[in-house]
Image: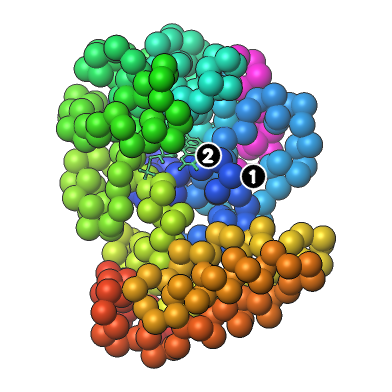
Amino acid sequence: MALSPEAHRALKLRFSVAPMMDWTDRHCRFFHRLLTRHALLYTEMLTTGAVLHGDRARLLAYDPAEHPVALQLGGSDPRALAESARIGEGFGYDEINLNVGCPSDRVQDGRFGACLMAEPDLVGACVAAMKQVVRVPVTVKCRIGIDDQDPEPALTALAERVRAAGADALIVHARKAWLKGLSPKENRDIPPLDYDRVYRLKTAMPDFPIAINGGVVTLDACRAHLAHVDGVMMGRAAYQEPWRLLAVDPVLYGAPAPFATVKDAALALIPYIEQVLSSGGRLHSVTRHLHGLFRAVPGARAFRRHLATEAVKPGADAGVLVAALAHVPDDALHGSSPGLALDREAGLSQTAAA
Ligand SMILES: Cc1cc2nc3c(=O)[nH]c(=O)nc-3n(C[C@H](O)[C@H](O)[C@H](O)COP(=O)(O)O)c2cc1C
């Protein structure tokens, strides 16, 4: 059955920033939202145990400006997942996503994450349980297989089972996870990427929304993937080089960029920083997400060094960010500064501020 236009709109699958533990916290997402109004942003994974028994108000809190924002859950007990999804929807999250891709030992002990690739029926039961209790889209993020699984039947089995259970989309990290012998970090690089396997899945299931993830660095690459699948999820490249996100709205959505330059976007973070500091937060918890903001422009390294050394000091305030930004001359961000592909990719004639 083809998706209705409403369901498509609700899904926001076209471009997303991946869930990344310790990275995509609420401060990171607020900052990313200044760079793109349209990307779907994912939380770090939260286990059902944390949602049900932890400091829920703190763990699930976010700023309304972050919308659209998806909550990623880790777990494998359908009842606990359903209850966690219901709570997440109550907090206003726009999508609930189930993690079927994380390979860490801790996650394997809890029998969730990537090891669920071997249990498509259980994943289907989890999705069905969540779908019963929430109205927002329920999606799954998975690998193409694990260990000695053959990705052809393994990915098909998982996709068919979650689709039958009512999942609204599947996001596929296009490599296997090797659960024995590789660290989570190695599991993001060593098993080879196989984009064709994901494209074949989409061809076999044309009406099931599918997004691809893994190794996508440029928006040109996103555009190329979008010829085959419905969405692209970018992880490390978005976090480590957030300047790329300023081009997302013009390049992928035909919409103006929120700011003319990344420096303007960083300055717009100041009221947020003041709010964080006044409620007892620390500057570094926000500015640590900005370290990769400039690339190949004069002052980029001095900016990074200033933030890294000054933002951790007791009493550091937004003035540290202003001083760090002063290392990057304004005229370095306009015109034909070598290496600043951003201006070209962003199509800056389309910026809202231009
Ligand atoms: C620091 C870090 C933490 C991650 N944490 C999660 C997580 O909580 N949930 C998840 O599904 N994937 C997690 N991932 C995997 C990413 O979502 C993504 O699948 C992976 O990095 C591949 O995409 P990329 O090549 O664009 O980075 C994490 C990746 C990194 C680098």
Type of the residue with mark 1: Gly
Label pair 1/2, CB-CB below 8 angstroms? no
Image region (quadrant) for ligand 1: top left
Nearer-the-camera pick, 268 or 66: 268
Q: Quadrant of the C terminus?
A: bottom left
- What residue do we see at 37% from left, 78% from top? 297
Q: Residue 212: horizontal and vertical position, in percent?
A: 31, 39
- What residue do we see at 61% from left, 82% from top? 323
Type of the residue with mark 2: Glu
Relative side of 353 to 305, left or right: left
| Residue 92, numbered circle | 1
Relative side of 307 to 143, left or right: right
Q: Residue 196: horizontal and vertical position, in percent?
A: 17, 32
Report crowding for label 1: few under 14, some 14 to 19, many 20 or more residues within 10 A (C-alpha).
some
Label 1 – label 2 distance at C-alpha: 9 Å
Q: Residue 170: horizontal and vertical position, in percent?
A: 37, 31
- What residue do we see at 51% from left, 33% from top? 97
Residue 302 on the magenta segment: no
Question: What secondary structure is the stretch in magenta mostly built from?
Answer: helix
Q: Secondary structure at mark 2?
A: strand
Q: Residue 225: horizontal and vertical position, in percent?
A: 22, 46
What range is drawn magenta here? 77-93
Residue that label 2 marks: 95
Q: Visible in this render: residue 160?
A: no
